[in-house]
Each structure stands twice: as structure tokens, then as C-alpha cells.
Image: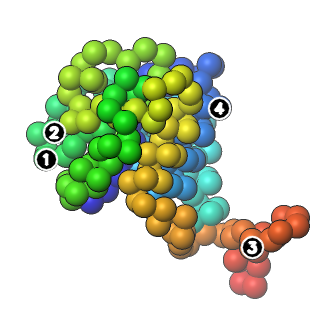
Amino acid sequence: MEINVLRLDHRRRRDARITTHVCLTARAFGASNIILSGDNDKKLMENVCDVTERWGGKFTVNYRKNWDNLLEEWKRNDGEIIHLTMYGEPVQDVVKDIRKSKRDKLVVVGGSRVPGKVYKEANWNVSVTTQPHSEVSALAIFLHMFFEGNELDKKFSGGKLKVLPSANGKKIMDLHENE
């Protein structure tokens, strides 16, 4: 089973930082792929791919201008859609049921305004609190609960850099230094 993330309606000028954080969070917390819709922001996509190259792991970034038919395709290919929204069922009440199914997942995080079609097509509309907050935090908490914390021990192979945990200061190992 793979976890994929769909970021709706990216706006290059307004959303570059938050969309980058959605991408980095998806990668770090165990997703396999992110699909960006809205503006085609090649620089943002290159930056995220560069992070994956330098820090390792398998994570892809794709662009899809129009996401509407992606939802139908996803379900037609036996995938499930999880829409993160403050109006959904509490994550703590539904995450076990979502985890039980071994079908590929598409986790949808909003942009400016989420059309009703997303709510209708989703297998689950899931809330991480019923208060306004960031799609970055909602994605991180959802993935953390979905993977039951195991993503915190995930190994990212093939990278050039690795953080060495330290109580004081930054310690980074260059894995290609001795080549």
C-alpha cells in the first residue's frame, strides 16, 4: 500500500512556502508521492526533488493541472481517498478503519477553497481537531497516527547527508565525503 498526497490549488506566488512544507512533511512522514494541482511550479518541484536526492528515500513529485478526474480515476483503480478537513470525522475515531484497508491511499489537503466534489468523492472526510489550523499540521498528525509513530524510525537510503542526533548543536554527516 502506498500513501499519496494531493495538494489542491497551489498558487505559485501565494502558496510556495506552505506547499513546500506540505511536500516535505509528506516525504518525512512516510508518503510515497505528492501530486500538485493548480499552478505548475517547476522550481518548487525541483527543490523538493533536490531534498530527496540529498537526504535520501524514494519520494516523487508530480503535477496535475486539473485534479477533478484524478479522484474518479483513483477510485476506479481501487484506491481510497482521505480528505483532511476540519469538518470531517475525528481522526482518532476513524484512523484504525482507514489503516485496516491495504488499498492505496490518496490524502487530499486543501488550498484556497475546497469544492464540494472532494467531500462527496472522499471515502473519509477526516478532521484533525475541529479548529482552523494548517494543512501541514493536519497532514503530519494524520500520517503520524496512520503509521502509529513508526514513520519516526524510517530510514532514508541513498542520500548524501544524514543528521547525527545531538543534544547540542547541528551534526550532519556527508555520506559521500570518503568517495
Real-space CA distance between mark 4 and mark 3, rounded to the nearest whole angstrom: 26 Å
| Measured Cα–Cα span from mark 2 to mark 4 | 30 Å
Check if mark 4's residue and mark 1's residue have beta carbons within 8 Å.
no
Residue, disc 4: 17
Instruction: Give the residue pinned by disc 2.
Output: 75
Q: Looking at the rendering, in which quadrant would you find the N terminus?
A: bottom left
Spatial CA distance of label 3 from label 2 is: 41 Å
Mark seen at residue 78: 1
Residue receiving disc 3:
164
Q: How is the image coloured?
A: rainbow
Residue sitting at x 65%, y 32% = 17
Q: Position of residue 171 (x, y in %)?
A: 82, 70
Q: CA distance from mark 4 to mark 1?
A: 33 Å
- The kind of residue on which mark 2 rests is Lys
Q: Nearer the viewer, mark 4 or mark 3?
A: 3
Tell me the kind of residue under disc 3: Leu
Q: Is residue 26 above or below residue 131?
A: below
For the residue marked with disc 4, what is the amino acid? Answer: Arg
Secondary structure, mark 2, is: helix
